[in-house]
Amino acid sequence: MNTFRVLKTAVTDVAATTTHQPGATTTAAAARTGVLNLSKGFTLHTPNFLAPTSRGVVPHLSPDNLERNTGVEGVFVALEDFIEKAPQRVPPLYTYPSPLRTFISLPASKFLVLSPRRSPAITCPKANSDANLSILTSVGFRDLPIKDYVSAVMRLEPDIVLSIADVANTVAPPGKNRVQKMLGRTEMWLDEVLKVAGGTGVAVFAPVLPVEKERQRMYLSHLVENVEKLSGLVFTNVEGVDVVPVELEGLVKLGSDVSVGPHQVLEMVGKGVDLFNVSFVGGMTDAGIALHFTFGGDGEGEEGLEMATDMWDVRFATDLSPLEEGCECYTCRVHHKAYIRHCLEAKEMTAWVLLQIHNLKVVERFFGDVRRSIEEGWWEEGRKRFEGRYKREMPVGTGSGPRLRGYQYKSVGGEGRLNEPAYRSLDSDDEGGL
Amino acid sequence: MVSLLKLAKITEEGVRFLSPHDGSPMLLTPEHSMSLQNSIGSDIMMQLDDVIATTSPDKERIVEAMHRSVRWLDRCIEAHKYPEKQNLFCIIQGGLDLDLRRECVKEMVKRDTPGIAIGGLSGGEEKAKYCAVVRTCTEMLPDMKPRYVMGVGYPEDLVVSVALGADMFDCVWPTRTARFGNAVTSRGTLNLRHASYAADFSPVDEDCDCPCCRSTENGGLGITKAYIHHLTGKETAGAHVLTMHNVYYLLDLMRNARKAIIAGAYPSFVKEFFGKIYNYDKAEYPVWAVDALKTVGVDITEA
């Protein structure tokens, strides 16, 4: 049995203990703490975060590092990372006799959230159809048959499964007919997931579409009808949170793509979102940027601070201080800025390992402080202070990251070389050297 | 100064090259090399040497490089600030010419450095010639000093070189090849990028006790070949776990070699090692290894 209990909401200050039973009384959307209990014994205190994975790993962290040196409790895994040439070639994952978590050697202490696509997902040129979702695998754009995803729910035994949203591939807002189709398909696909999920104990999260409330009223009432079978809701944008009818307030709310940063997290926490797939962290780590924002602590009067620092900067070449003073992560306990900058400069993979460990620790601490602020009644004050203290945007990286892979970006044609060669010939001026 | 010769220019003064970081011109002299290693504080320091690919047809240049390496050794010894706490190793050069190697050994041994390296090998020369050079050098070297063969890391090369009297090795191959998805195992090197491993759910090496191969029940990570295949060349963590395995395998190989030597059982260790890789099919054993081992009285083809 998957259950979610709201422990405390920030506005009312009343410990309203509600489960997601239909008709249970809940307050309007506001920051809240809660406990998510998953059927396989995982307990998660919210607000909290999921670590995004790529091909089943939290980037740069081998399973032992993930276990020993991070406080990650759950990971976000995309099926599109595993199916390559399906259906022409059966993906090894489908013939693997054990659950997905064993295939990726996920430490037993972490729970697994299965999504059809990475988050943020690369836009596919081909539209979805009733039976297929357009996806990008490491061998190119393909179709993911909905029935494959549904049977994956049974076979791969995730702890949480995200049902599929039919989201348009265009930048422009969808027209009337397209919205109808989106809602129809999303509802149909959800029903298929719910059909198989019933006996498995997997928690099903239903997508809320990024369109206005009026336009998805029918779909939302379908969710309300099925609220007992659902454990959570998934949002792709901040605005989506506003459309949730009060009957669904007792479900866990997941922001599946937090690519902007902590300000976006706080805005969503303020609207009652509980769980966040922190996709901004990976980009920072790859760019060689160390995070150092904090929600707790004092520091009154400070404003306009950076939330992160580019470690490629030459001023760190001889800086023997840790990435962040007082940080208790492995990286800060054992290493200093100069070493990390040196590893970046040498394109040594250890740089990204150390940065990822630290960056995830900063995020873990941030969510711990947010939970504490709600429990202790200083959430609003803390949020205002954070917004005043830090710039809204993350700094832009100046150095180069690890080798870029095809499935990490979409080519638009005419770009320069993505991965520059390190060595040049002594004699000639030509760029290619050898 | 190691390989990448196309990228550098060598004069009596030192080696000129462009920084791989910012493209600025650099000059590495024996004195500067010592000063850098003194400030790093490494326990073992290597002299700056002049290396020519053993496969080079330019005989004269090889002779020059050997003599220059001896001269640079003198400059290094002179410039070394902490001989009492850091061990400077000389590096024997001389290409594949055994007389040149002997001359170099004679000159360098006179300098009485705490350890001796055999350099310039592992550059694509024939294995038989490689073995001849190692044996020629080790025969002349004093017993109580460590002998370090530079740039060697294939398991077969290690096992044979130990038989020929070498003590220490270094090589980027085990870790680099891990990044390319190649697993070094007791049954040879496996290219895990190959499609045949895509659905192979066994550990990288059944006999291995490394954290990557050990099952989760026994406190390991329980990584499968299929998962490495899935990650190789795409996610850095794939390189991390396979690197763990490859390094562990080589350390374990050398640990077992030491045990066998102490037990006086090195020949049978060598036999078992080759037997496992080639499935005891003696016709498959590399001729160079069989011949080189015979020169030190080990016959891996006999029962």
Image (tube, rainbow, N blue to C red):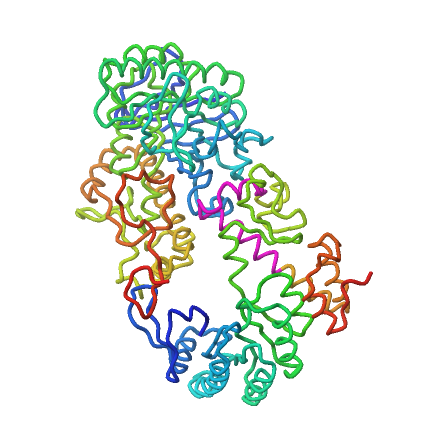
Q: Which residue is situated farthest in the right direction here? A: B303
> Which residue occupies the foreground of this view, A133 or A391?
A133
In the rendered image, which quarter is residue A176 located in?
Answer: top left
In the rendered image, which quarter is residue A205 located in?
Answer: top left
A307 left or right, relative to B123: left
> Which residue occupies the foreground of this view, A141 or B77?
A141
Q: Which residues are magenta?
A: B222-251
In the rendered image, which quarter is residue A390 located in?
Answer: top left
> Which residue occupies the foreground of this view, B242 or A288?
B242
Numbered-mark total: 0
Q: On screen, A307 above or below B104? A: above
Q: Is residue A183 visible?
A: yes
Magenta stretch encompasses residue B197: no
Q: Position of residue B110 (x, y in %)?
A: 57, 90
Q: On screen, A86 above or below B78? A: above
Magenta: main secondary structure: helix
Q: Quadrant of the C terminus of chain A?
A: bottom left
- Residue under the point 65% across and 81% down: B144
- Residue under the point 45% across and 18% down: A193
Magenta stretch encompasses residue B242: yes
Q: On screen, A159 above or below B130? A: above
Q: Position of residue A93 (x, y in %)?
A: 53, 32
- Residue under the point 60% across and 38% down: B201
A405 left or right, relative to A82: left
- Residue under the point 35% across and 57% down: A421
> Which residue occupies the foreground of this view, B220 or A325?
B220
Q: On screen, A29 above or below A265? A: above
B102 left or right, relative to B81: right
Q: Position of residue B105 (x, y in %)?
A: 58, 84
